Amino acid sequence: MTDLAPGPNSRRKSKYAPRTVPDQKLATSAMIASLDAEGRNTVSAPFGNALIDMAKTRDDIVGLSADLAKYTDLHVFANAYPDRFYQMGMAEQVLISAAAGLAREGFTPFATTYAVFASRRAYDFIFMAIAEENLPVKICCALPGLTTGYGPSHQATEDLAIFRGMPNLTIIDPCCATEIDQATRAIADHPGPVYMRLLRGQVPDVLGEYGYKFKLGKAQMIHGGNDVLFISTGFMTMRALDAAKALKADKIDAAVLHVPTIKPLDVDTLRAEAAKTGRLVVTIENHTIQGGLGEAVAADLLRNQITPNFRSVALPDEFLDAGALPTLHHQYGLSVPAITTQVKAWL
Amino acid sequence: MTTALSNTSLARRAWSIRRHALRMGEVQGQGYIGQALGVADVLATSYFHALTYRAEDPEWEGRDRFYLSIGHYAIALYAALIEAGILPEDEIKTYGMDDSRMPMSGMAAYTPGMEITGGSLGHGLGIAVGAAMGLKRKGSDRFVYNLMSDGELGEGSTWEAVMSAAQHKLSNLICIVDFNDQQADGPSTQALATTPEAPKWQAFGWHAQEIDGNDLDALVAAFDTARNLDTDQPRVIICNTRMCKGVPFLEERDSNHFVRVDPDEWANAIAFLDAHMPA
């Protein structure tokens, strides 16, 4: 009996090592998992409902899905506007190509699937049929980064790295229900192609209480702080805010700069904030350490001779484990306690 | 442009398309001339029998869409667009040059009348599916034509699009397969394009015709059938063509994907055509 040796970066145990029942049992987080257990108010299906609202006044809005309408919240739009919804079946290449064709004919297609499938299966079609011609197709994808316990088949831990190399493509990683609602409307008005990461189901609201207004291409300070500058994207801004709150107990004053637009980066705001002296700069993202927000920010700062004490919180360059999300987030450093422990060690 | 022309006139159009393509090949000393000569009759029938368009307004909303999925066939489509008056004939000498509107692989942003950027094979039919959906949404009665190669039948994305077109009842979609049985490494039928071809499309819900793609009468009849069919099926015309058709000394050459033509042979080929101009 042979066992494939784990790769050099893998922490996986051998499949032939017997396991025992853990003391604390957590169920595997399903593919339909929502990030709803964070002690915040939630909003149902903000993406689908924003589309419904826009469709009232815009005949050009159409929706397509590759057998994942229910799992991307497009189903509420499909129910409200059945004649504007195209079920493309389990076929991501024609999902994307057909969206390109609809855009050629003047429509604004919202194409939905999981982030793994858009980035890995449909890349060439997004690149050539959509981005090369700068067509206004909006590719909105659920399960970004580590938001399911189903393992690498469904964990799009490298989607930002894959898409950052694509010219013309705008990339958005929204934080919460408020931002998904606002960003969906903003990208519909944007004349070019967009890839947006989605949270679905009961989506926590985070930024609403700050009076936040999403602006395409803009990073925004959620709150200031003198010791640490968190530069965060996606739902990790929620974790950054919670980490900043927790760090107060240790008299550590952390600022949170939210960067929902990964491309094009708001380099002016990033450079200005990172150049302020005396702060530990920490990028935080729900994505592999390879090629995401952290590397994008680091490269831009270094190219502009801005060299703060710089660290990154991100997923490791590994195929991640299956399991329960809270377990996995903690294991891979994305939980609030993992972040605060790490920051205190870095300071 | 829907006025039916006599087949004699179509023969003259096909002859002109071949001649334009050879002149472009002569400019670069290379090009996918085998494909251009082979598909010239298909393009003549498309642009001078089947398609509705306005040469002076290539993006006219009321046009039939013509998608070239096979980017490397650009030399052939440029020749047709020149013959149709969409591109000026005197730009032939810019073919493939820096800053030309006629790059070696067809791209929508470069060329009037080039509707999509092809070249990454297996893309055209899927885009055509979306365009056909869009035209139906708009209540348009125009057709989307997608010209693809037999090699593209190997791409999985082609079959996603084939299934999708039938599922969505895209009766305004006409796919044309240039079946010359040549792809980069050899005969397509020895790669993935197994024959018989038409029954596969029929099994997927399409109306399929398989014809001699160098027979203008057969082409006209097949296009007429595809356009006038009274069903909600998408339509495919599988055109069996001969590489280098129309220039016998090239036709007889061991046919392959990228036909080698010696420097003096371009002029010889053009001279042969000039001596055999149809009425």
Image (tube, coloured by chain):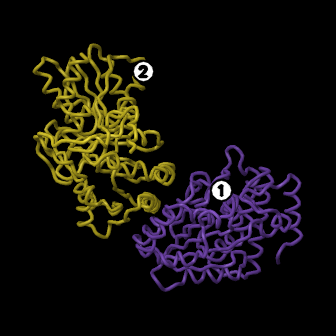
- Residue A106 percent across, percent down from the top left: 43, 61
- Residue A214 percent across, percent down from the top left: 26, 41
Is the N terminus of chain B in the top left, top right, bottom left or bottom right quadrant? Answer: bottom right
Residue, disc 2: A302
Q: Is residue A134 above or below residue B149?
A: above
- Residue A345 percent across, percent down from the top left: 23, 18
Q: Chain of mark 1?
A: B
Amino acid type, mark 1: His
Chain A appears in which tint?
yellow
The residue that appears at 38% across and 25% down in the rendered structure is A298
Q: Chain of mark 2?
A: A
The residue that appears at 71% across and 79% down in the rendered structure is B216
Answer yes or no: is residue A64 visible.
no
**Residue that sits furthest to the bottom in the current view:** B230
Q: Quadrant of residue A234?
A: top left
| CA–CA distance in space, label 1 to label 2 | 42 Å
Q: Nearer the viewer, residue B157 or B226?
A: B157
Q: Is residue B230 above or below residue A94?
A: below
Chain B appears in which tint?
purple
Q: Nearer the viewer, residue B204 or B127?
A: B204
**Residue that sits furthest to the top in the current view:** A278
Is the C terminus of chain B in the top left, top right, bottom left or bottom right quadrant? Answer: bottom right
Residue, disc 1: B72
Amino acid type, mark 2: Leu
Marks 1 and 2 close (CB-CB < 8 Å): no
Q: Nearer the viewer, residue A299 or B154?
A: B154
Q: Using residue A274 as the reference point, say whether residue A340 is left or right of it.
A: left
Q: Dot 1: what SS?
A: helix
Q: Are marks 1 and 2 on the same chain?
A: no
The residue that appears at 21% across and 50% down in the rendered structure is A33
**Residue that sits furthest to the front in the current view:** A1
